[in-house]
Image: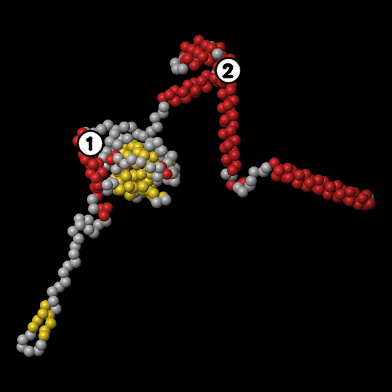
Amino acid sequence: MNTSLGTGPLQLQTVIPPLPNPPIPTLAHRGTPRRWENIRDRGQYLQNRVGHYLEIHPNGTIKGNLGEKTMYGIIMLISYVTNSTHGQKPKDTIAIKGVVSNLFLCMDNRSHIYASRNVTPDCAFSEGFIHNYNVYYHASHKEKRKKFYLGIERDGRMKPGLYARNSQSMSQFLPVQVPPQSMYRAKQESARLSRTGIMKLVGRNTKTPDPAKKRKNERRRRRRRWCSKLQKIYKNQEKYQGRCKRFCDLLDEMIKNYSKHKKRCERARKRRRKQSNKRRHRRRHRAKRHDHSKRGRRKEGRRQRTKRKLREYRDRKQQTELRLSLELTTKPLLQTDR
């Protein structure tokens, strides 16, 4: 902007300099949220309301650690877009990856948890919120309308998604921030494991039955089957003893003490029948309780039953008296007409 002073031949002109530019911060993450400053360092712990931290070990073991933060519990949630199926739109889901193990948490169509080195559709989870906690369920696998939720049991084992509920404390997680030093150690351990070679992964997190319990149940089933035809076995002992392959000691004992085991089998049969009758009665009672046509009715007690029967008796008595009185009044009229 130029300004002139005076009107003579000598004129003075003054120039006003422009304003300087505003200061620009020298930070590397200016203009972006703080959590985007380094995408590779977005690790976190996942702790459920019971207190377990989700861990993915290098050998494929997935479990919960109660109240202790370890490097195997550092998790990364990676955005993962599933392919469209049956004409549906692709879903925006997440994949849960362990920083140290470089393995992804996956769930099969039977809701069993396992670890995988590659991202597959089994590793796609959706995230929800309930009571200010995060819940994770599988994006595609479900049983009818029941979603498969991610949950940790109280002993640290992973609960099958079919039996986990979003209202349970074991399925509600809270993300916890990871200190930079712990993240640095986890990356060093991951690099060391990658140099050592590929480790063999364990099987899926399914319940392995106890061998002793399994043998006991099989022995009980064999005894029940032999009890149904104990008399036939006692008559043809050599035939059944020659065919026996497992639990032959039990068969010999039943043949040797025939009368004792006969009474025992009869008691067991009566006990099973009693239990089945109880279950049948419970099912019928539950069906009556949930019957919409009888909703609002209370079960009739002994006093109510007595009052109802007395009321019905009085009504019948009044009806009989009324009928007799009508007959007595109409009979003379009929005689006079004749």
- Badge 2 element: helix
Give the image quarter of residue 185.
top left
Residue 15, given in percent of the width and then of the height, sits at: 11, 77
Q: Is residue 332 visible?
A: yes
The amino acid type of the residue labelled 2 equals Lys
- Badge 1 element: helix
Give the image quarter of residue 51.
top left
The amino acid type of the residue labelled 1 equals Leu
Looking at marks 2 and 1 on the same chain, the residue that comes earlier in the sequence is marked by 1
Q: Quadrant of the N terminus?
A: bottom left
Kindly identify the residue that appears in the image at 35 percent across and 38 percent down. Answer: 65
280 in relation to 236, above or below: below
Residue 67, given in percent of the width and then of the height, sits at: 35, 41
Give the residue number, with chain letter if any, for mark 1.
Answer: 193
Query: Within 10 angstroms of label 1, few (less than 14), some, or many (20 or more) residues?
Result: some
Kindly identify the residue that appears in the image at 12 percent across and 82 percent down. Answer: 3
Kindly identify the residue that appears in the image at 20 percent across and 55 percent down. Answer: 28
Residue 151, given in percent of the width and then of the height, sits at: 39, 41
Q: Is residue 105 left or right of residue 40?
A: right
Q: Nearer the viewer, residue 30 or 236?
A: 30
Residue 116, given in percent of the width and then of the height, sits at: 30, 37
Kindly identify the residue that appears in the image at 23 percent across and 53 percent down. Answer: 37
Give the residue number, with chain letter if any, for mark 2.
Answer: 262
CA distance for labels 2 and 1? 63 Å
